[in-house]
Structures are given as structure tokens and as C-alpha cells.
Image: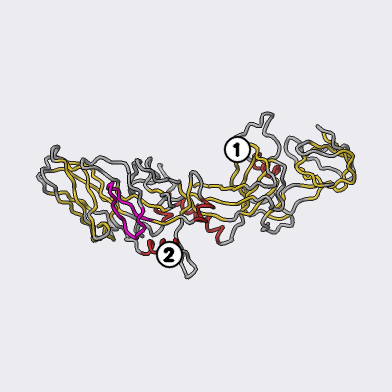
Amino acid sequence: MPAIITRQLRKILARNFFDGFNLNSNNYYVGIGRPEQWDSSDNVPIPEDTITDIRQVRDQLTSVKKVQAVSQVVPRNNWASGTIYSQYDDLISGYPTQPYYVKTDNNQVYMCLETGRDANGNIVPSTVEPTNSNDDSHRLGDNYVWKFLFTISSSDANNFMSSNFMPVKQQGPTDSNSTGIELRQESVQNHTKPASITSLVLTNGGSGYTSVPTVSITAPTGVGASASAHIDSSLGIVTHITIDPDSSTLAHGAAYYNTPTIGITGGGGTGATARAVVGPDSGIGRDAVNDLRSTGVMFHSQLLPNDSDFITGQDFRQVSLWRDPRQQNGAFFTDLTGNAMDKMTLSSIVTAFTRDKKMEGQTSGAIAYVDHIDSNEIYYHQTDSTGYIAFIDGELLQEANGAGDGVIDSALIKPKYDVETGDILYIDNRAAILRDTTQTEDVKIIISF
């Protein structure tokens, strides 16, 4: 039996992640790890969702930092002169090839309600950038009709803007501390027209039209919408239909909760037909998350040079996202940062050890990678390739592929962060990134449903 998962479900899943962060019901962490090379040429593999891959992410994790902010996001579409944009259409479930919404140079976001057309009904490129931030839609000189939705604040742009995505939100209640951007979006939300007719799509141009026919809109509910037909008298056809002007805005009407019937009569011709595109019952602009069909969430965190628990002078090749990790004692881990590496202390060091070398216990036969050295402390990890034999207190320790030599005092000091806990939601394998004392990593993880 044919079946689909609806966008509504994907939207609910994205919203649950978003709410889980804002309500503090879940703790999310960005993790970095994998200091050793992928292979002899360090070729980056495609991550796989297997038990083995997940285990290796846990084994090779070095540090974590709490996610600082979360936002729902949508694909980023920058307005550009000369581009043809689609118009909002209630028959389209996803994103059309030509986007139906844009972000302008000043970070204002608009939805296209009606595509611009020339006198012959041909779609024309957008050449006039929308700038009006009023509550109502407006038609520009290129005949495109745009509806302002919201402005992306500087902080949201810094946290959640990427080359491919941009933040979107529904404005919550405002107060005396709210910004002008927030108050403006609240006004847009409060002045939406429910179930308005955003456009009329011509489905048949008919024939024999010598003058402009009359367009009628009828429905069991709904009031205020009106539109006009345009013809090519030389061909005798209706070329397109536009929503009529209405004072300072357009006559989209409201409350068309049942599909309107569009009549095209007079003008000496027959056969022209059209359908109405109706906006959501709540009104376009009431919920920009829904209007822009967001099913994605971005998690943002900055890894700063002075973050505790993060080592420098070492590289990483893997970024991951964790939910609800725990401490070694079983309590939820809630610290801002966390070290995830096992540690040993040495009672004596004959020859210094070196990062990224393998070290081997001469009695136990245990092998591990050296991740970081701090005086007589060695941070290390083991993997499937090294095996998981435990080191022994008091045994001689030597580098398997280097000159390091010493004696173990305490073989295993576990970190507060328990790598065996928490859900791993995202894995990103990449080329090596070397962390230094002046470097900041701006991590933005997008999960789309």
C-alpha cells in the first residue's frame, strides 16, 4: 500500500529537538576526536551508522563542549537580481527548484506570493529587491509580490547562519526588554490574514477572448479577495491572473477555509480556468517555521582556545553530537566542557614520550595511542586496532614505534565524562584540524528530518 511520512511529522521531530534544548530536558554536547590518521594517506572515510563505527567514535573522543544555542533552520536563499523565483503554492510539499522565499542583504526574509510576469504572461526575473517591512504584502515594479516575514538578528546570524542554511523562528511573547526586530515580527504575526488567497494560477488560457473577462471567487467561507485577468488579444487567450490592489496592500481576502471556485466569464471567449492558492489557516507570517517548511535544527557551539579540557598542539578528524551523556558515577554530565580521555601517571620517565605514537606495557602487552602529555601524565586511548588489554600499575612502558620509556604509577584514571553513555546523533569525518592556542572552532551541526 502506498504511504508517506508527512512534512508535519518531520516538523514535529525537529521541534522536539528544539524544545528539548530550550526546556533543558536534554543536554547536548559537541565532541571532537580521532587524533590518529585515517589510513597511511589519511584519506577521509564516509561515516557509517554501524555498531562498530559508533564504538570507535566513543573510543577516539578527546573532548566535549556543551551546545550553546539551537535554532530551527531552513535552506538559505539570498535574493539576487536576475533570478526567477517561484511563488508560494499549496500544492507543493517541499522546496521547488526556484525558491519561493529569500533573504535580502539586510537579513530581512520575504516570501514570494506572486511571481512577476510580463504583458504576455511570461515569468520574468526578479530585479527589485524587497525592502518593505510592513505587515501586508506589496507588489514591486517587476510585478513580484512579496510578504515580509521577519529579520534575522545579528546574534542569530552569527550563531546560525551558514553558507547553506539560515535560522527561522516563531516570535514568542515580547516585553519591554524585547528588541525592535522581535517587536516587528510579533506585529507581523498578529496581523496575518487566515486562509487568504495568495495567488490564482491559470490552468487553461481558453480561446476567443477579445476583451478582458471577469474573474469571480466563490466559496462557502471567505471574503475580500478579488483578482483581474490579463489577455493576449492577438491570440485570444488569458495569459495570467493577478490579485487586485486594495488600498496600500493587495486583496488577498481571508477565511477561505474551503477550496474556492474560480470563475472566468465574459470577454467573448471560453475555456479559461484557474485555481486558487490558499495560505495556511493561521495566516502567512503567523508561523515562519511552518511557512518556510522547516524540518531542520542547527546546534551551535564555539570551541575556544582557553576552554578547559581541550588540548592544543593535537589534531582531530571527527566531530560528533551527543545527547544526555553521564558521569562515571551515573549522574548526568552537565559541565560546560569535558575531557573524554583515559589517563595514566608515570613514576619515572627515562625518555620522553611523543604524541600520536603507540605505547606498550612490557608486562601486560597492552597497547594504546598517546594523545597528550602533561608532565608525568599521559592521556591515551585504545581502539579495535590496538586491542583493549589493560595496563598494569608498576609495569615498564615503552613506545612501540618511538623512544619513549618509563614506569607506570597509576595505569588507569578515568575522566569524569563517561564515553560509554549518551546517544551519538551525528558523526562528521573530516581532514585533520590542528588545534593551537589561538584557534577558535565555530561548530554548526545541522540535523534535517
In which image quadrant can residue 45 be found? top right
Left/right of residue 355 with respect to residue 259 in the rendered view: right
Give the residue displayed 67% in from the left and 34% down from the top.
38
Q: CA distance from mark 1 to mark 2?
A: 44 Å
Residue placed most toward the observer, 100 or 184: 184
Residue, x 24% and y 54% (percent of image)? 260
Question: Bounds of the magenta span?
Answer: 131-148
152 versus 388 height, above or below: below
Q: Is residue 272 visible?
A: yes
| Marks 1 and 2 close (CB-CB < 8 Å) | no
Q: Tag 1: residue type?
A: Pro
Seen at 29% across and 41% down, the residue is: 124
View extreme (top): residue: 41
Residue 259 sits above or below residue 385 on the image: below
Q: Amino acid at mark 2?
A: Leu
Q: Nearer the viewer, mark 1 or mark 2?
A: 2
Check disc 1: other Cα within 10 Å, few if <14, some if 14-19, many if 20+.
Answer: some
Rendered location of residue 176, percent (x, y): 47, 70
- Foreground of the two, 6 or 386: 386
Quarter of the view holding residue 224:
bottom left
Which is more N-terminal, label 2 or label 1?
1
Residue for badge 1: 47
Q: Which residue is mark 2?
A: 183
Residue 265 lies in the magenta stretch: no
Main SS, magenta residues: loop
Image quadrant containing the N terminus: top left
Q: Residues within 10 Å of mark 2 (few under 14, many from 20)?
A: some
Indicate the secondary structure of the residue bearing disc 1.
loop
